[in-house]
Image (cartoon, rainbow, N blue to C red):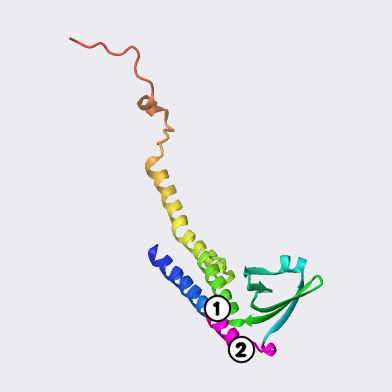
């Protein structure tokens, strides 16, 4: 069991570590260069912010399966404008992490089909032969013999009444 869990767990931890490193690199990049041509402008109403954005923390959110880091915010009326850094690296790592978790839990569509075939294969090997062998054993060894000839009834009949007297 350990041999199965350790590789998956270590890979998940490694991807999370890489994700943290990418976040740090992006922050340093944003501090060094905040040219508006590199940023993406996203605008949302208050209800859209609540329903469409998956907030990671105050300066980072996920929108349409893409990660964004907020560089600047402006509000006009009921609309909020976000100038964001589109974080391609973190988006890619998130997708890899989701695929890895799906693979580990058997939710990956390709693996589900393979798992079904593998289970069916093992069932056909072990269970069908076991059922046949058990059925044969029960029929030959454990089944009570049926006496069709009435001359053998005395072997299976009730004891003689009264019992014979003992000579003492």
Give SS at disc 2. Answer: loop
Q: Main secondary structure of the magenta part?
A: helix
Residue 122 place in picture, x, y as percent: 47, 62
Total labels drawn: 2
- Residue 2 is labelled as none
What residue did someone put label 1 on?
23
159 relative to 117 in the view: left or right: left
Is 35 part of what is drawn in magenta?
Answer: yes
Q: Earlier in the sequence, mark 1 or mark 2?
A: 1
- Residue 33 is labelled as 2
Residues packed near mark 2 inside 10 Å, few (<14), some (14 to 19) or many (20 plus) = few
Q: Nearer the viewer, residue 39 or 99?
A: 39
In the image, residue 33 above or below residue 134:
below
Give SS at disc 1. Answer: helix
**Where is residue 87, by image quadrant?**
bottom right
In the image, residue 17 above or below residue 160:
below
Residue 116 place in picture, x, y as percent: 54, 64
Quarter of the image for the C terminus: give it.
top left
Q: Nearer the viewer, residue 147 or 92?
A: 92
29 relative to 150 in the view: left or right: right
In the image, residue 159 above or below residue 72:
above
Q: Residue at x 55, y 75 (%)?
A: 96
Residue 76 place in picture, x, y as percent: 80, 75
Q: Nearer the viewer, residue 89 or 115?
A: 89
Is 41 part of what is drawn in magenta?
Answer: no
Dots 1, 2 in contact, CB < 8 A: no
Separation of marks 1 and 2 at Cα, in angstroms: 15 Å
Q: Residue at x 57, y 71 (%)?
A: 98
Range of magenta residues = 22-38
Q: Residue furthest left?
A: 168
């Amino acid at each position: 069991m350990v041999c199965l869990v350790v590789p998956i767990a270590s890979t998940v931890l490694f991807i999370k570590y890489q994700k943290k490193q990418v976040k740090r690199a992006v922050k340093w990049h944003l501090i060094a260069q905040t040219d508006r041509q590199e940023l993406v402008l996203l605008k949302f109403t208050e209800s859209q912010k609540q329903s469409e954005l998956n907030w990671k923390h105050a300066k980072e959110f996920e929108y349409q399966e893409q990660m964004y880091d907020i560089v600047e915010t402006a509000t006009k009326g009921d609309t909020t404008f976000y100038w964001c850094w589109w974080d391609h690296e973190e988006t890619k790592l998130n997708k890899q992490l989701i695929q890895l978790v799906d693979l580990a839990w058997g939710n990956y569509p390709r693996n589900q089909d393979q798992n079904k075939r593998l289970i069916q294969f093992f069932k056909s090997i072990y269970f069908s032969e076991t059922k046949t062998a058990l059925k044969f054993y029960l029929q030959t060894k454990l089944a009570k013999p049926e006496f069709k000839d009435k001359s053998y009834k005395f072997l299976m009949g009730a004891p003689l009444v009264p019992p014979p007297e003992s000579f003492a």
